[in-house]
Amino acid sequence: MHTVVVGTSGVTASDVLAVARGGARIELSDQAVAALAASREIVDALAAKPDPVYGVSTGFGALATRHISPELRARLQRNIVRSHAAGMGPRVEREVVRALMFLRLKTVCSGRTGVRPEVAQTMADVLNAGITPVVHEYGSLGCSGDLAPLSHCALTLMGEGEAEGPDGSVRPAGELLAEHGIEPVELREKEGLALLNGTDGMLGMLIMALADLDVLYKSADVTAALTLEALLGTDKVLAPELHAIRPHPGQAASAANMLAVLKGSGLTGHHQDDAPRVQDAYSVRCAPQVAGAGRDTLAHARLVAERELAAAVDNPVVLPDGRVESNGNFHGAPVAYVLDFLAVAVADLGSIAERRTDRLLDKNRSHGLPPFLADDAGVDSGLMIAQYTQAALVSELKRLAVPASADSIPSSAMQEDHVSMGWSAARKLRTAVDNLARVIAIELYAAGRAVELRAGLTPAPATRAVVEAAREAGVAGPGPDRHLAPDLAAAEAFVRDGRLVAAAETVTGPLN
């Protein structure tokens, strides 16, 4: 099994995906253990002094004015975890919780939080045992970090609350820890606060969305090319020299992908045949511009994710010179903004894909294809309602594009009076990514059928490979009406797990 070694820095997006989705094991480096011990010595020294230090010997948030005596500090740390584990609603997905915990462990191991090495080791042990705390949908405002979600994770470390075992059953966390020989932690000064104060949930969901969208943007280039071919469009608009004079890198990459997929097509270039066209419609001709803008948005979001991965987010934080200082680095605005930005790009990509699909189904605009790609139009409805489903998904994508980060709601008696709503932005982006996969799947389903209905014309080798692979995956071709939902589900799986892209790449080589 793959092992991820966590040091004081250097955790990558690939590491997060390996732990969250691949079940990779975690080890703490000697450097991380030494940094943990060194920062803990600083916290212990401060705890022994009479001067109040936020999070060490004071209350939290609006209650930070109270000095806490030494005999109450362990109780203080337990209480912050218990009281902040106040989430409600459905359970959050296992991969999200694993990313959440791993990213908090990453920051703990930076040596900037004052947490003892044994607490960090317990976090690694819980992840390695396949124990997943029960975290709920609602509870984070994306400021002071993802407090409620992280609190539910910390509760598991204490042997309290509920968690999911490696077999998928939800049981008391204490029982699961005992079965795996893991001792619950007894939190000391600052440790409860340090386990809760991070942007880890929103960052984890951003990293996973970026991985999924990398596949979906390539998929969209392939389906756009397939639609262009099915509509007998021209690939001249994809020429590199046209995109070089508007030097957006994403646009050039999308155009290059489409051109590679269409290489050798016998269907393109017939736009001057029976019903001459000067230009293809925007949804076809401008596909690289729209998908390219989304790709550039992905690039910006990756930059933000990389910076956040390099951060040690906590409050207060232990600085290299030994100072322990309060700060506002837990505010989720940088991550929240790009989560919302991605939702906008996703909505637009879904929207243009739906317009292409509708054009394939309309006999007045499809240049010779049967109405709704039906076998016997009138007796058969063909893909009419598949497009309805796609339109419903796109309408939902537009609602999900409304930014969460434009909102703020004050909390903690106005101490935390401006929040990021980054967790909410991440949650809706996950839904948007799922819906985009379905939208692309429906375009694939329609365009693949349309290409096969172009009798006597030979598709490009890459598009032919895609259609053949889809058929092998259970995505049916032309014919009389049939139960469509299973076919669309097969198409969705074909897109989502990367087989669509892989099929094209057997001919084109790696796509951009």
Image (cartoon, rainbow, N blue to C red):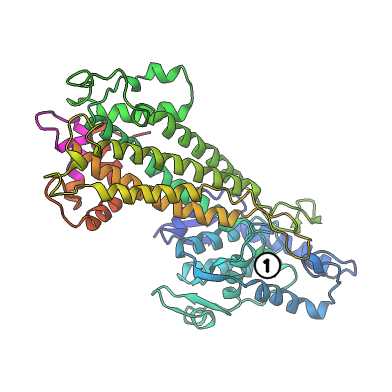
The x, y position of residue 25, in whole percent, is 46, 62
Q: Is residue 169 left or right of residue 206?
A: left
The x, y position of residue 39, in whole percent, is 73, 60
Mark 1 surroundings: few (<14), some (14-19) or many (≥20) residues within 10 A: many
Q: Would you place residue 272 above or below residue 105 in this image?
A: above
Q: Would you place residue 443 above or below residue 52 in this image?
A: above
Where does the C terminus fall, quadrant-wise?
top left
The x, y position of residue 458, in whole percent, is 14, 29
Observer-nearest residue: 75 or 65?
Answer: 65
Q: Is residue 198 left or right of residue 49?
A: left
Residue hosting label 1: 116
Q: Name, please, the residue furthest toward the right.
A: 50
Please report the bounds of the magenta region as a residue range: 451-469
Q: Quadrant of residue 463?
A: top left
Q: Which amino acid type is marked by label 1?
A: Arg
Q: Name, please, the residue furthest toward the left.
A: 456
Q: Name, please, the residue furthest toward the front.
A: 378
The residue that appears at 65% across and 55% down in the rendered structure is: 110
